[in-house]
Image (tube, grey):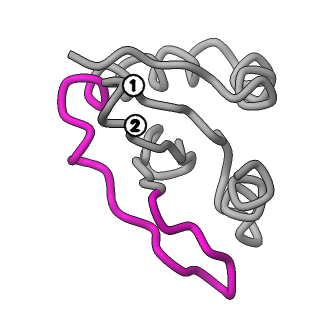
Amino acid sequence: MYTYKFHPEAKVELSKLNHSVQILFAKTLKKILKSPELGQELGNKNNMNLSGLQKMYFDNKKYRVVYEVIENEILIHIVAIGKRDKMEVYQTASERR
């Protein structure tokens, strides 16, 4: 099973979500740690280079977690957590690379 680490700002994003959404995130994180390939590859989105990043939905597709799989360290790096509104979560992920 993989271990994980948060981008410092992604941890802040998680702390701002209400408790029930945080629980749903935790369940999604468990799935990612067991099978990171379940996430969808991002590639290029709206002229943003997100190659190497994956996304997984939670809370009925309201939120996304964007993460990077670092195979040689058996590590999941949580890059961004948020809503898709105006591609915001993807823009944030792109800036954190």
Residue labelled with disc 2: 70
Amino acid carrying label 1: it is Leu
Q: Is residue 46 magenta?
A: yes
Q: Secondary structure at mark 1?
A: strand
Q: Position of residue 58 (x, y in %)?
A: 44, 40
Q: Residue at x 56, y 33 (%)?
A: 78
Amino acid carrying label 2: it is Ile
Location of residue 26 with respect to 10 vertically, above or below? above
Q: Residue at x 62, y 74 (%)?
A: 49
Location of residue 89 with respect to 46 vertically, above or below? above
Residue labelled with disc 1: 75
Judge the density around disc 1: few (<14), some (14-19), many (≥20) Cα neighbours within 10 Å. some
Judge the density around disc 2: few (<14), some (14-19), many (≥20) Cα neighbours within 10 Å. some
Q: Is residue 71 magenta?
A: no
Q: Nearer the viewer, residue 73 or 76?
A: 73
Q: Position of residue 54 (x, y in %)?
A: 42, 54
Q: Residue at x 62, y 23 (%)?
A: 6
Could you tell me if the residues under marks 1 and 2 are in contact, i.e. CB atoms within 8 Å?
A: yes
Q: Quadrant of the N terminus?
A: top left
Query: CA gap, disc 1 to disc 2?
Result: 5 Å
Location of residue 42 with respect to 39 vertically, above or below? below
Q: Secondary structure at mark 2?
A: strand
Q: Which mark is residue 90?
A: none
User: Is residue 92 toward the left or the right of residue 43 in the image?
Assistant: right
User: Is residue 1 toward the left or the right of residue 60 in the image?
Assistant: left
Task: Specify the segment rendered in magenta.
Answer: 31-52
Q: In the rendered picture of this protein, how many numbered marks are placed on residues?
A: 2
